[in-house]
Amino acid sequence: MSSASWASSSGVSFTRRGVKDGHPVVFLHGWPSSNREQFASDELLQSLNLDWFSPNRPGYGETAWHQDHGLLDWPARLVAWADEQCLDSFHLVGYSGGGPFAMACAYKIPERLQSLTLIASLAPQYGPWNRVHSLLLRRTPTLTHVGFRLLGAYRKRFPHRFAKRAFQLLHPKDQALLSEINFLPTLLEVQNDAFAQGTAHLVRDLQLYEGPWGFDPAEIQVPTRLYVGSEDIQVPAACSYWLAERIPNAKLTVYNGEAHYIPFTHAEETLTPIVIP
């Protein structure tokens, strides 16, 4: 087993865990998150013989930020990084806000993907924003940036208070689950990485989620599995229902009565089909 973090020559920082030269899996983190958010245990990666890579998207951790970063720009950057790791093809897992970027890869570089797994993923027809949020992102981006900079300054001064408040906004079932596994210290590390380069990338990702994606998920031809909790309040289950209907031959699993952090309770169920279709 190995576990290490690097910054590649392509400017992408990442973590590698699991069995070297096992089945290659690339995990795309959510928003606002980083590669420190890990749901698969070392024992599970070992038993499934998975070589687990977790790259940070632009602006997160030590991955270089580009102001013109877009959904359809990410696949080329991921390919450059994958080439450095000698990954000719790999399984791709997108969780929450990582889902749209995973789908962009499935759309644009299907020849590099063996499978696509979407867990509590966003969809273009449904976002975690209301009309006020949409108006701010579209009509007053400067105001949005100012608001996030203030948020970032508050988090920097009061990191524990910020993390606890974020924790309180979760579904009660997620709060109970994450309390049981003592996730708060990890949440602090994740938020440190997410805000390390400021907040411009956080706003940019929200704009990408909310704006036109530049592709239709119906054009995805990579074998796809989706997983969602029926009581998810961070990313509505309607996102996964819509995607399951849209992506050809996609298979959807719904965990009734569960919320957003389903990969922490169903890691084996979501990852086993990667190696045993």
Image: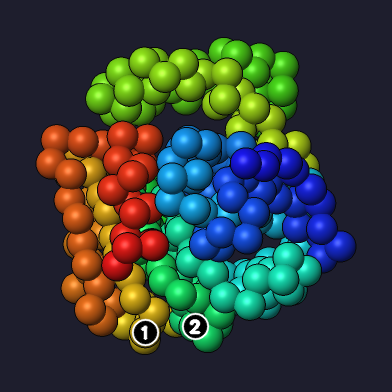
Residue 142 in the image: above or below residue 21: above
| Residue drawn at x 57%, y 18% as measured from the top left | 185
Residues packed near mark 1 inside 10 Å, few (<14), some (14 to 19) or many (20 plus): some
| Element type where label 2 sits in the image | helix
Q: Residue at x 63, y 60 (%)?
A: 21
> Which residue is nearer to you in this view: 7 or 41?
41
Residue 265: x and y, percent?
A: 31, 34
**Residue 248: percent from left, percent from top:** 26, 81
Residue 67, located in which quarter of the rendered image? bottom right
Q: Which residue is mark 1?
A: 221
Q: Earlier along the polypeptide chain: callout 1 or callout 2?
A: 2
Q: Quadrant of the C terminus?
A: bottom left
User: Which residue is found at the position 26% from the left and 37% from the top?
Assistant: 259
The amino acid pointed to by label 1 is Gln
Give the labeled residue for mark 2. 110
Q: Is residue 203 among what the camera can see?
A: no
Of residue 216 and residue 93, the one placed in the foreground of this image is 93
Q: Amino acid at mark 2?
A: Pro
Determine which quarter of the picture holds residue 155: top right
Q: Position of residue 90 (x, y in %)?
A: 54, 69
Residue 20 percent coordinates (x, y): 64, 54
Please report contact status of discs 1 and 2: CB closer than 8 Å, yes or no.
Answer: yes
Q: CA distance from mark 1 to mark 2?
A: 7 Å
Answer above or below: position of 189 versus 7. Answer: above
For numbered disc 1, what is the local secondary structure? loop
Q: Is residue 157 left or right of residue 135?
A: right
Task: Report whether 15 appears left or right of 48.
Answer: right
Q: Relative to 110, say whether 120 is above or below.
A: above
Density class for disc 2 (Cα within 10 Å; few <14, some 14-19, many ≥20) is some
